Every structure is written in structure tokens, then in C-alpha cells.
Image (cartoon, rainbow, N blue to C red):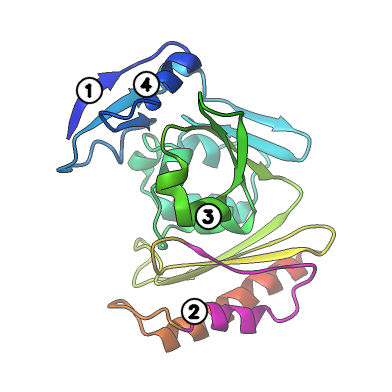
Amino acid sequence: MIIEYHRPQTMDEALSLLARRMPVTMPMGGGTVLNRPSPDAIAVVDLQALQLDEIIQKGNLLQVGATVTLQGLLEAPGLPAALRQAIGHEASYNLRHAATVVGTVLAANGRSPLATALMALDVTLDCKSLASEDEQIGLGDLFPVRKERLRGRLVACLSLPLNARLGYEYVARSPADLPIVCAAVARWPSGRTRLALGGFGPAPLLALDGPESAGIEEAARNAYSQAGDEWASAEYRQEMAAMLAERCLSGLSSEE
């Protein structure tokens, strides 16, 4: 339940509000998560007036502001086709026009196609607070401790690389459903390869990050060895994860 609403005009004002111990105060972009019914009493800091709605290319990085919507990112030029696919799989057309990229990712669980793709791409988040200097945090490092790490902080933007190619594959009960298993593979010109798996658990899982792609199928199987739930058995997810990882890698190799 939202008990206070603030719309600061400056970053310092927003950070001062977020730094309060009570009431619990959270940043709000599109509001698609915080506006859901909840028994918890919270204050919200609307970011709409802070001019964080830009997508800026700096060299090989694309910086995506905190209030850029999913649809805004999907329509950005130069985006990998697989990332567009993951965004489209994340949410319906109407929801994509309201939900922000940063808010969606920070609230994501393991079934999020977008969070899985961005983990594979090794995106970083630019975090601001009054108590410390600006901090760059990798998405994979943040997920296990996001509740504690983000308290009093504002993610102003995320940065994703444009020099990595991306593959995304999934299996679901229907094309409109979130995945039972999904795999995203990013590969850099140096040969560095990252495999992220989604469809299970509280957050996507990084299964491989190495100088080459050797052993990617085994890495996928090992990562999902305990990934059983009401949607699928661990054995099924292991086999699907290995198959999807190999399919992603084959697609990237065919583009070379």
C-alpha cells in the first residue's frame, strides 16, 4: 500500500527521500510493480521529472535511463534481434509502454526473459546514493543481494554492450507464456562467451562465463541439476537448457 507519493525535481531531492529509514521509500518509474496490491506500507519517489528517459550510445555501450520503457528500448536502433525478441517475450504491447526496463529487471524473478538476456550480456547498473560515490554493479552480482544492496540507492541507468552478439531461445507452454526454460548466449569478438539460463528460481542463473564456448552444454546441465518445480522436472530442464544453449551458439556461429 502506497502511503506517500513524492515527485522530486532534482536528483539530490530524490536521493534524500530514498535515504530515509522510515517509511520504507522506493523509486518508481512506470509503476507497474509498485502499484500492485501489497500489505506493505511504502512511500514512492516518482522519477518522471528527473530526465532519466534517454538512451545514449557511448562507444560500445548503450546507456538506458531509469525511466526508459520496455517499448522504448525495443525500438532503439542497433539493438540485437535476440534482445528485441526477449523484450517482446517479457510483456504484452500495452504493458511495454508503461513498464520501465530498470524497474522490470530489478523486480524480475528467474522466469524473466529480459533479465536472462541482460545477464548474458553482462550489463552493469549505475547506482547513486547520498551516502557513497556512484557505484557500478554487475547485474549478476546484484541479484542475490538486491534487496539489501539497493536500500537507499537509485539505479539511474543500465549499460549494455553493443559489441557482443546475442542468441535467445526458449520453451514454454504457449508462445504467450513465460518460459519454462530459456537460454541466452552472448559472445564477444575476443571469444568470451556467457550463458545465462532462465525459467526457474528467484533470478536467472549465470551458467558459463569464459574465454570460449567449450563445454557450454555440460555447463547448462550442471546449472539446472536441481531446477525442479511444479512446472517441470530438473531432468527436463537440464536437457532443454543444454539443447537451447547449443541452439543459441549455433545461431551465433552461423552469423560469423
Residue type at tag 4: Leu
Q: Nearer the viewer, residue 166 or 174?
A: 166
> Tag 2 or tag 1, which sits nearer the N-term?
1
> Tag 4 or tag 1, which sits nearer the N-term?
1
Q: Is residue 26 above or below residue 4?
A: below
Q: Quadrant of residue 37?
A: top left
For marks 1 and 3, give the CA distance.
37 Å
* Residue contact at pointers 1 and 3, CB within 8 angstroms: no
For marks 2 and 3, give the CA distance.
23 Å
Image coordinates of residue 245 in percent, x first then y, are 61, 74
Q: Secondary structure at mark 4?
A: helix
The label nearer to you, 2 versus 3, is 2
Q: Which residue is mark 3?
A: 85
Does 192 lie within the magenta span?
A: no
Seen at 42% across and 62% down, the residue is 110
Seen at 19% across and 35% down, the residue is 41
Residue type at tag 3: Gln
Left or right? Give the position of 136 relative to 50.
right
Q: Which numbered dot is residue 17?
A: 4
For marks 3 and 4, give the CA distance.
36 Å
In this picture, which residue range is highlighted in magenta? 204-225
Seen at 76% across and 70% down, the residue is 253
Q: Which residue is mark 1?
A: 4
For marks 4 and 2, give the CA distance.
41 Å
